[in-house]
Amino acid sequence: MRRMHFEVVELPLARPFAISRGIRTAVTVVRVTLEEQGFIGLGECTPTAHYNESAQSVSAQLSALQADVEAGLSRAALQKLLPAGSARNALDCALWRLDAALQQKTLWQLLDLTAPQSVITAETLSLDSVENMATAAADAVSRGAILLKIKLDRDAILEKVAAIRAAAPKATLIIDANEAWSGIDLGSLFDALTQYHIAMIEQPLPAGKDGDLQRFPHVIPVCADESCHQRGDIASLRNRYEMINIKLDKCGGLTEALAMVSEAQQQDLRVMVGCMLGSSLAMEAALPVTLTAEHVDLDGPIWLAADSSPFLSYHNGHIWL
């Protein structure tokens, strides 16, 4: 018989993490363990208050499904029983890993994919003063970072980007505004940012209030994050975005993430893979999606005071498998 256990775990951060919506010093995750025939499948999710989630709400969703899971619930059935979100993600990923273990395969073998030796990942620059963000950029590239993701709000946008570009002249730069740029003349701002060779700007306007993105040419590609949760969202985004950010915690797991890749390709939208703060356990589950991604942002573990198994190796701007 299959058994399911889940627990809430508090993960302290090594340093504060700031975005336009606030500052965090720790992250709360929920972990699922499935056991069957002596084999184990693990999953981890990060409930997000911005999406009306909490450790308590996720735990309640998992508890309600415990009997079904232990009776042999399949991944396909799970997609119909839980909505997109963190709870389904943790359980979906645990089921993928359990199925692989039962068949004595790796997740890559189960998916009939070849694992890369390494994947280039962004290193996030937390929102801070101009000087501190430039210092963080210089430190990141001194350690081998290749891709930097700049967290911004409405304050000193051009000054911060200019300082970061000066500190990291060869790095690829992407910007994440976290919905903070309402009321700004985006066409003029994008034009001003071109001199800094920005590869992409993520979610400049709030989800549901991003219609202004249709009104000017995008000299820099724009990526939907908060506006794109699951495959049903994708078709309607083509007139506003060039790219979507797939996060397992948003879409509800690897099963839906792979379906989103197929839908994005059909809609001629490029793909980015992102994450919430979390451990290597959560990041590893998203790695199969990176094979088709233009940008990868799976740096959650480097913000933690202590990571969790299975440990991924982060150095020289890569995740080493």
Image (cartoon, grey):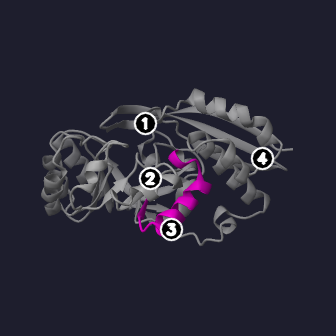
Query: Which image quarter: residue 84?
Result: top right
Kind of residue sitting beneath label 4:
Leu
Give the secondary structure at mark 1. strand
Q: Residue at x 72, y 32 (%)?
A: 64
Give the class, few, some or many, for how many residues have Cα within 10 Å of label 1's Cα (few <14, many ≥20). many
Give the secondary structure at mark 3. helix
Q: Is residue 269 magenta?
A: yes
Give the secondary structure at mark 4. loop
Mark 4 or 2, nearer chain start = 4
Q: Marks 4 and 2: which is nearer the front?
A: 4
Q: Marks 3 and 4: which is nearer the front?
A: 4
Dots 1 and 4: beta carbons under 8 Å? no
Kind of residue sitting beneath label 3:
Leu
Query: Which image quarter: residue 155?
Result: top left
Mark 1 or 4, nearer chain start = 1
Pick whichever, 76 or 313, lies toward us: 76
Give the secondary structure at mark 2. loop
Q: Which residue is mark 4?
A: 73
Q: Which residue is mark 2?
A: 274
User: What range is drawn magenta here?
Assistant: 250-274
Direction from residue 157 to residue 210 in the image, left or right: right
Which residue of the protein is positioned furthest toward the top in this rendering? 56
Pick whichever, 48 or 30, lies toward us: 48
Q: Which mark is residue 13?
A: 1
As measured in the structure, the alpha-carbon distance from the residue carrying label 3 to the one carrying label 4 is: 28 Å
Please state, as top left, top right, bottom left or bottom right, where the N terminus lies in the image.
top right
